[in-house]
Image (cartoon, rainbow, N blue to C red):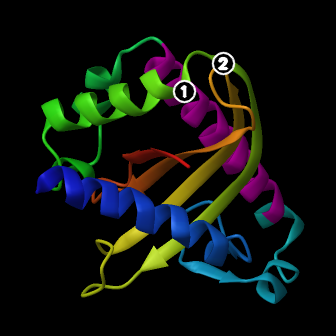
Amino acid sequence: MKNAQFLMLASMLALSFSVSAQQTAATASATPAQPAAARQQLTPEQQAQVKRQDEEMGRSALQVAQLVDQNKTAEIWDGASAVAKGVVTREEFVRQIAADRQKLGAPATRQQVAVTRAAYAAGGQIPAGNYINVVYATKFANAPDPVRELVSFHLDADKTWRVSGYSLR
């Protein structure tokens, strides 16, 4: 049951990519996502902050993906957000990712294609909070076409971004 909930969370975050791809944060301090028109109103300093945060989150997401490549998913779960830990056990997290990755084989190339933001209110299907999603087009040995690899982060109460999901589509 918890595995299904985690996969549902990862899937909903993945679906949020299509919505949040049209949105961006107003500042690097994780304010809720705003329409593209609001992005144009950012000051140069705010634009620089968003760019820096995108770069930082991209590096963090790459580290997560590389830990998955090295079969160190338990380490990812150990440092994950309470949001993720609340819906899946460590064992299920490790087992499901290993099963998904085993089918695909080793990664050959990984190209970051997007960094998106989303904010969810309490009471929805996705736990409330601010999220950043980093999306890769990853080519795997056993897949003819690139696969969308998504690493999601949640801004926890201590104002630290932590992994909240990993999914492949």
Q: Residue at horizontal 80%, vertical 78%?
A: 39
Can residue 79 be seen in this snapshot? Answer: no
The tag on residue 141 is 2
Question: In the image, is residue 120 part of the stretch drawn in magenta?
Answer: no
Q: Is residue 128 above or below residue 5?
A: below
Q: Is residue 87 left or right of residue 143?
A: left
N-terminal of the pair, mark 1 or mark 2, is 1
The tag on residue 43 is none
Q: Is residue 16 left or right of residue 48?
A: left
Magenta segment, prevailing SS (helix, strand or loop): helix
Task: Give the amino acid type for the residue marked by disc 1 in the picture.
Answer: Leu
* Label 1 sits on residue: 104
- How crowded pointer 1 is (Cα within 10 Å; few <14, some 14-19, many 20+) is rated as some
Q: Is residue 40 above or below residue 25?
A: below
- Picture coordinates of residue 108, whole percent (x, y): 72, 17
Give the structural element (helix, strand or loop) at label 2. loop
Image quarter where the N terminus lies is bottom left
Region of the chain picked out in magenta, as a range? 47-69
